[in-house]
Amino acid sequence: MFSILQKRELAPEIFLVEVEAPRIAKSAKPGQFVIVRAHERGERIPLTIAGYDAQRGTILMVIQAIGVSTRRMQAMAVGDRFADVAGPLGQPSEFVAMPDAELKQQRLLFIAGGVGAAPILPQVEEFHRRGAHVEVILGARNANLLILKDELQRSCDALHLTTDDGSAGRKGLVTDMLNDLVASGNRYTHVITIGPMVMMKFVARAAKALGLPAIASLNTLMVDGTGMCGACRVTVGGKTRFTCVDGPEFDAHQVDFDEALRRLSMYKTQEGQRLREAEQRGHICKIGRNS
């Protein structure tokens, strides 16, 4: 159980892994996540589900090495096993429960930045398969960081690429592309954004200016995935919500992004300190199959 069946590098320090998890594969829905531990004493890491195959009994996860635990996971090879993969957790996308007849009337625009492409992929696949018109804006700093392009291209009506340096697609921000698409006469019923917190803040602002409902996935705030640690607290519509229990998706126009950015900054500072301490102790170089 939880064996790595396939592993593929998507970009520097970003990998896609297919993991044996039959019970999760049978019950997972778009928008949900899992909690993963590399070994029995390992840290609990929340990872969004990038895909699932009930017949194969497998799920897909994208792992970006940004700290001690994710670097341990990244070092694992095909045939290795995670100590634990728990889930599916969190609330599915609100469109999952929408009747097909109503979903077919939707024109959904997904806006993803960086590894945000992973959690939008199962949503794009599912809602397009059920008849919704689905378009995707995929943005990154450069062409090398535009992950899952082919998979998204096969699963949507239109894929729009943007890069900060112009090395692929349009040069500029995802919000520039959003404004241009609407100005060109494209009509959307909802914007769904997943990616860096600051990107989602400005996507929400742009969507509101255009009169478009917007949904943001705040999965980057999650730490233990149960709501017990309190790290993923966020204010939505003036009320406290826990991203891992009540979300990860919320009405983007109701999210206090400034508060979320402050909380995320605090966590990243602590994680960076832990990584530096581990490197100084030599832990990172010891990462391997038996770690």
Image (cartoon, rainbow, N blue to C red):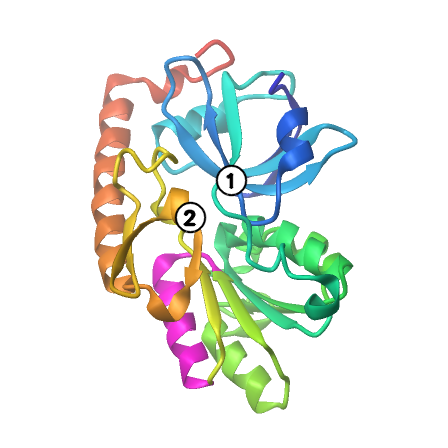
Identify the residue shown where x is 66% and y is 72%.
106
SS under mark 2: helix
- Determine the residue located farthest toward the top in the rendered image: 290
Q: Say if residue 233 shows up in the picture.
A: yes
Q: Say if residue 20 shows up in the picture.
A: no
Q: Main secondary structure of the magenta part?
A: helix
Three-letter code, disc 1: Phe
> Mark 1 or 2 closer to N-term?
1
Q: Is residue 107 left or right of residue 202?
A: right
Residue 101: name its quadrant.
bottom right
Residue 253: name its quadrant.
bottom left
Q: Nearer the viewer, residue 73 or 46?
A: 46
Identify the residue shown where x is 52% and y is 78%.
178
Q: Which residues are magenta?
A: 194-210
Are discs 1 and 2 less than 8 Å apart at CB? yes
Q: Nearer the viewer, residue 224 or 184?
A: 224
Asked if residue 203 lies in the magenta stretch, the reply is yes
Where does the image place residue 86, in percent across and percent down from the top left? Answer: 51, 27
Three-letter code, disc 2: Asn
Identify the disc placed on residue 237: none
| Image quadrant containing the N terminus | top right
Identify the residue shown where x is 24% and y is 30%.
274
Where does the image place residue 135, in percent across and percent down from the top left? Answer: 65, 69
Q: Which residue is mark 2?
A: 219
Q: Which residue is mark 1?
A: 33
Against 104, is 99 above or below? above
Residue 200: name its quadrant.
bottom left
Identify the residue shown where x is 25% and y is 42%.
267
Q: Residues within 10 Å of mark 2 (few under 14, many from 20)?
A: many
| Image quadrant containing the C terminus | top left
Where does the image place residue 19, in percent across and percent down from the top left? Answer: 63, 27
